[in-house]
Amino acid sequence: KAGVTQTPRYLIKTRGQQVTLSCSPISGHRSVSWYQQTPGQGLQFLFEYFSETQRNKGNFPGRFSGRQFSNSRSEMNVSTLELGDSALYLCASSLVLASGTEAFFGQGTRLTVV
Amino acid sequence: AQSVAQPEDQVNVAEGNPLTVKCTYSVSGNPYLFWYVQYPNRGLQFLLKYITGDNLVKGSYGFEAEFNKSQTSFHLKKPSALVSDSALYFCAVRDMNRDDKIIFGKGTRLHILP
């Protein structure tokens, strides 16, 4: 069974631009979460979607947004990019929301803002 | 609010020796607890989880973790370390009683010395 797929794997953008990252969860998984990973901060929670609804949100500015489609695929968008947005963005999917089921992670999208 | 602490940024262990990676947590209700491992340029891989029941949980690659409610800890252990265990390890918690996200610690880098 295919794992979590994130595209693209690598991105280079300039300050002020916007970017859209995509995540396809494991088939049948309805919950998708996004995390930002940086060396100094570890994994910071961005948001979680379940059945096309945002269920939880982390402490990130409004420049960070996301959505989930009816097939559970999710996208996150970052507008007006800043140098500090350079990070590995990880997507994770799980079968259901708020349960003991583990999350499965994609390989991430490495975003570099120059 | 829930939180996870991994007090050690780095742990060095000689190959063949037992290893412990520490994790403490804070949740308002009962916890779901997880350990993940990350190899270079990869996403996170699930190792093991505690949901309920036996306090000693066994997982992948010979790892185990012990849930200690009184000390609010969930330390990761392995009886005999391998060089291939060298990686970044993350502890995570989800509040069982709330519709809440999975929160990760900042990670502990494990170095197994040959």
Image (cartoon, rainbow, N blue to C red):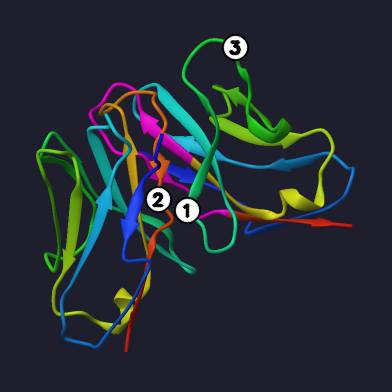
Query: Image quadrant for the N terminus of chain A?
Result: top left
Q: Which residues are magenta?
A: B92-107
User: Could you tell me if the residues under marks 3 and 2 are in contact, i.e. CB atoms within 8 Å?
Assistant: no
To the question of a shared chain for discs 2 and 1, the answer is: no
Q: Residue at x 22, y 87 (%)?
A: A15
Query: Image quadrant for the C terminus of chain A?
Result: bottom left
Disc 1, SS: loop
Q: Residue at x 27, y 26 (%)?
A: A96
Chain letter of mark 1 equals: B
* Residue B106 lies in the magenta stretch: yes
Count neighbours of disc 1 (C-alpha within 10 A) and say few if under 14, some if 14 to 19, many if 20 or more: many
Q: Which residue is mark 3?
A: B54
To the question of a shared chain for discs 1 and 3, the answer is: yes
Between circles 3 and 2, the one closer to the viewer is: 2
**Percent x, y of residue B7:** 60, 51
The residue type indicated by label 1 comes to Gly
Disc 2, SS: loop
The residue type indicated by label 2 comes to Gly
Q: CA distance from mark 1 to mark 3?
A: 29 Å
The residue type indicated by label 3 comes to Asp
- Quarter residue B62 falls in: top right
Q: Is residue A8 above or below residue A48?
A: below
Q: Which residue is mark 1?
A: B43
Disc 3, SS: loop
Q: Which residue is mark 2?
A: A106
**Percent x, y of residue A53:** 9, 39
Chain letter of mark 2 equals: A
Label 1 or label 3, whichever comes before in sequence order = 1
Q: CA distance from mark 2 to mark 1?
A: 5 Å
Whether residue B107 sits left or right of residue A12 in the image: it is right
Q: Residue at x 46, y 40 (%)?
A: B92
Most distant residue in the top direction: B53
